[in-house]
Amino acid sequence: MNILLYNTLSRSKEVFKPIKNAGAGIYACGPTVYNFAHIGNLRTYIFEDLLKRMFIYNKYKVKHVMNITDVGHLTSDGDDGEDKMLLGAKREGKSVWDIARFYEKAFFEDTGKLNILNPDIKCRATEHIQDMINLIKRIEENGFTYVSGGNLYFNIEKFKDYGKLSGLSLSDLKAGARIEVDENKKNPHDFVLWFTKSKHGNQDMQWESPWGRGFPGWHIECSAMSVKYLGECIDIHCGGIDHINVHHTNEIAQSEAATGKKWVNFWLHGEFLIMDKGKMSKSAGEFITLKTLTDKGFEPLDFRYLCLGAHYRTQLAFSYEALEGARNGLKNLRRKIIELDNLPAHISCNKKKEDYRKKFNLLINDDLNIPQALAFLWDLIRDETISPEDRLKLVYEFDEVLGLGIRDNFAKRTKVPEDVHLLLDKRMKARADKNWKEADRLREEVFKKGFKVEDTPGGQKIFEL
């Protein structure tokens, strides 16, 4: 079955054709580990997780590489501003190394809570400095660099396709230039491959290089590590839409300048999660983390469910009202799963089961049409022509893509605490004695403990709220 993906480079959906048969190499821009990830960042990682899960569902062998930026990223996406790692170290009175390890650990704790699958390869920038130096040498040997003010720059005038990802030509970029003037640059959009002498002279993280002691520019790490682990031509590169104009554009220029080959076949970008005042940003100092949500009583998977309701290429408006709606949706889904497990069995039509599989596969393969796939899951749950057992099996199967942990939640749900069992036994006796007032009171006691009781012809049924 064909997989269609929207390629930012062509501005159109294209049939995915892997470089290696039945393989999918995915490079995803990872976190800059100077602060907690905010929920806008996490939305992008959920989209990338859905992409990976979709490929696995289609029996592809996925190799997913994610970088950990622990050096070189300034507070602007260009070469301006303060070093983000130093910023974090100053804020907390710790070393840049301590900051990096702390927030890296926090990041993967958050992604774990969101049921985001771990990358197959996590690569720290600080552990791949020599790989970056080696790639920069190739770029230099091919005539794309110059030294100015002690730093090594990439000359975008030498790369004729610069700006092809953003759809802007060199002349467009010059006409629309709104970036801080760097007197060392020949063109305002040239970018640093290696810093030596600059306003970041107090940088704690420095290494020896052919251009002097210093540290790499931000963009070079992704090129170096993707080439190391996925080869000089890769299937897919992912990231947030904010990376298109600078970071990913510069990655393309330096990678293809080094190798002389087309670097990435498919570019996939996730849209912003927006607040009332626009997109969320750490640099503004006000942002919502996953802990912010859990402190307010939400589960991490409530946020994942919210993200499933919007296509990754559309903006998602965040509000606590919307998150409350997602929480209720997930609770209802879990309750329906319990109900299915309690329904009497009957025989299903095998063809209809396969029709559901086929339709679900078509939806997820159509540029990750997850909102419709989630709606389709609800259609399946309500379809009484399919046996409860088969509906459950299909729900669990589809959830391998959606990642809501439905099977795990069901397994945990079946362990009703002993004190709740005692209340249920008392309520059963009260109903047998026709003491309806006492039965209702006990129902409320059960409810306060996080469970809902329903009376059915087969007896009391208990559901976790």
Image: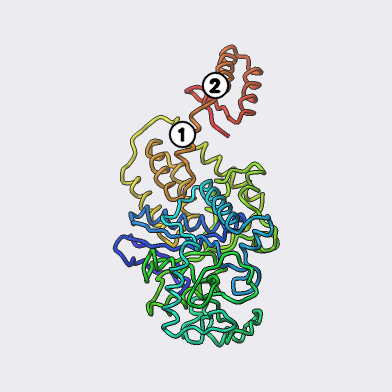
Three-letter amino acid code of the residue under disc 1? Ala
Given residues 374 and 343, the one toward you in this image is 374
Camera sees residue 464: yes
For label 2, count other residues whose C-alpha is less than 10 Å away and answer few (under 14), some (14-19) or many (20+): few
Residue 6: quadrant of the picture: bottom left
Residue in the image at 55% along x and 56% along y: 43
x and y, in percent, of residue 53 in the image: 42, 53
How far apart in space, not on screen, are marks 2 and 1 (Cα)?
17 Å
Q: Earlier in the sequence, mark 2 or mark 1?
A: 1
Residue in the image at 52% along x and 68% along y: 207
x and y, in percent, of residue 14 in the image: 40, 69
Given residues 295 and 411, the one toward you in this image is 295
Query: Against 396, is 362 above or below?
Result: below
Residue in the image at 66% along x and 21% along y: 441
x and y, in percent, of residue 42 in the image: 56, 55
Which residue in the structure is indicated by mark 1?
Answer: 411
Residue furthest out toward the top: 433
Q: Quadrant of the C terminus?
A: top right
Camera sees residue 10: no
Three-letter amino acid code of the residue under disc 2? Glu
Query: Against 285, is 450 above or below?
Result: above
Q: Quadrant of the N terminus?
A: bottom left
Provide the secondary structure element on which disc 2 rests: helix
Residue in the image at 51% along x and 75% along y: 249
For label 1, count other residues whose C-alpha is less than 10 Å away and answer few (under 14), some (14-19) or many (20+): few
Given residues 375 and 112, the one toward you in this image is 112
Which residue in the structure is indicated by mark 2?
Answer: 418
